[in-house]
Structure formats: C-alpha cells, structure tokens
Image (cartoon, rainbow, N blue to C red):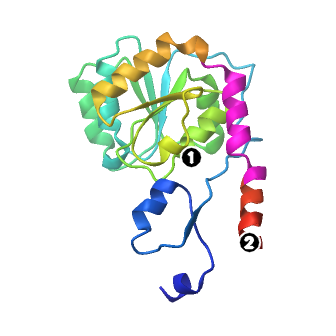
C-alpha cells in the first residue's frame, strides 16, 4: 500500500481493469498491452483450414463450456482448443455427451511457436471468457491476420472493432450466432486490414511512446 501511495502513476492494461480497482487505487492510467508483431504475423505459405481456434487455461472463467455448447449449435464449425487446466476432464466429457468428438479437438499445452502456427492456419479465433481484464490472445491472432469472436467480458471491448471481428454476449447462443456470422461474413474481414489495425493500435512502438509520455509528466 505504501508503494502505491508513493507512486506517481499506476498503469493498468485496460479501462475495464481501471474501473475494477479504482475504488482502492484511484490514480490509474490505462496503457494497453502491445503484441509482438515480428513473431505473430501472417504466413502466406500456410493454407487457411476450416476450423475455429480457442487458446487459454481450461478454467471456469475462460468459458470453454459455453463455447462447446455453442459448437453444438453450429454444424459447420470444427474447433481446436489449446491449453490445459482443472476443467479439462469435465470439458472432454461434455464433448462426448454432445456427440462432438469428431468436431472438437483438445491439443493440450503448446509451445509459443506452435500456437502461432495454429493461429496462422485457423479460420478465426474465438475467446469465450466470462471475465478478461484484457485479452492478449486476441491481439496475437489479429496480428496473424485472423478475425476474432469474443465475449463482452471486460477487456475485449477495448480491442475488437467491427472491422476485425465480432463481440457477443456471455452465453452459448450468442457465441453460436456470432460464429455463424463470422463464417457468413468472412469476406469482409481482410487479413491485411486486420493486421494493420493491430499495428496502428497495439504495436510495441506505440506502447513505448505511451510509457515515455507518462514518465515525462
């Protein structure tokens, strides 16, 4: 607490996060996380495959149960899930109960390089979280030129615009509707435009500039 009181600036990753802690820490400044644009980039040698990708810890707040229910409502979608966690067995059982074993694949924990390859090959990325202070995985997929579907769970509202993806409510029906939409409206999501959006708003250069501006005040 003493360190916080003495600090001139307290930085947070989103306005949503600032709102969550402002009652206790009023002097916050939002500086959005950057994404490594050199590492996460499109690969024209990799053909886009017909699957949606989800990446994250397999925990309740990440909403993978909602996503699996949504996939059951969208017959054309295949889903690959990267990550591990305490809910893995429960989610695998859910897939079996819904008869989705041929459409939902658990890839387990993957290296950063492997995650990038899966992103470069997916049709779109989906983030079904119940709560996110920001949502770095969205930036990583968008840096690879991929559109996204994300729940309105906090941070994603400060990342996703109508030109790069779709925002939806935190429930399986809304996820299903918007995954269907992103499939049917796929042509309006241009890979180059998506990456340019990330370069304009979430580049390391911009992040450094905002840090420098803060320190000069």
- Relative to residue 29, is residue 77 depicted above or below? above
Residue at image location 68% in from the left, 38% down from the top? 198
Instruction: Give the extent of the magenta segment.
Output: 189-206
Q: Residue 60 at x, y = what percent? A: 31, 47
Residue at image location 69% in from the left, 20% down from the top? 46
Number of the label disc, if any, that sits on residue 136: 1
Indicate the secondary structure of the residue bearing disc 1.
Answer: helix
Give the class, few, some or many, for how many residues have Cα within 10 Å of label 2's Cα (few <14, many ≥20). few
Q: Residue 98 at x, y = what percent? A: 23, 22
**Residue in front for this viewpoint, 157 or 41:** 157
User: In this orientation, does residue 23 appear?
Assistant: yes
Indicate the secondary structure of the residue bearing disc 2.
Answer: helix
Residue corresponding to mark 2:
215
How many numbered marks are there?
2
Q: Residue 157 at x, y = what percent? A: 48, 41
Residue at image location 29% in from the left, 33% down from the top? 171
Q: Residue 86 at x, y = what percent? A: 32, 50
Most extreme residue toward the bottom is 2
- Relative to residue 149, is residue 61 depicted above or below? below
Left or right of 156 on screen, residue 190: right
**Residue in front for this viewpoint, 76 or 195:** 195
Give yes or no for contact between labels 2 and 1 (Cβ–Cβ under 8 Å): no
- Does the magenta run of residues contain 69? no
């Amino acid at each position: 607490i003493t360190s916080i009181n003495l600090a001139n600036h307290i930085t947070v990753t989103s306005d949503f996060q600032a709102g969550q802690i402002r009652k206790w820490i009023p002097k916050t400044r939002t500086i959005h996380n950057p994404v490594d644009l050199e590492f996460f980039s499109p690969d024209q040698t990799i053909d886009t495959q017909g699957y949606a990708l989800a990446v994250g810890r397999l925990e309740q707040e990440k909403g993978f149960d909602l996503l699996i229910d949504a996939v059951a409502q969208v017959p054309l979608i295949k889903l690959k899930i990267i990550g591990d966690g305490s809910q893995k067995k429960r989610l695998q059982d859910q897939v079996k109960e819904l008869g989705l074993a041929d459409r939902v694949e658990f890839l387990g924990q993957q290296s950063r390089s492997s995650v990038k390859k899966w992103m470069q090959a997916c049709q779109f990325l989906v983030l079904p979280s119940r709560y996110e202070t920001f949502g770095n995985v969205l930036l990583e997929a968008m840096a690879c030129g991929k559109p996204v579907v994300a729940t309105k769970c906090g941070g994603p509202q400060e990342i996703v615009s109508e030109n790069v993806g779709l925002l939806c409510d935190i429930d399986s029906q809304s996820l299903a509707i918007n995954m269907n939409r992103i499939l049917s409206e796929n042509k309006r999501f241009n890979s180059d435009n998506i990456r340019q959006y990330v370069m304009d708003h979430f580049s390391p250069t911009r992040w450094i500039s905002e840090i420098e501006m803060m320190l000069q005040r």
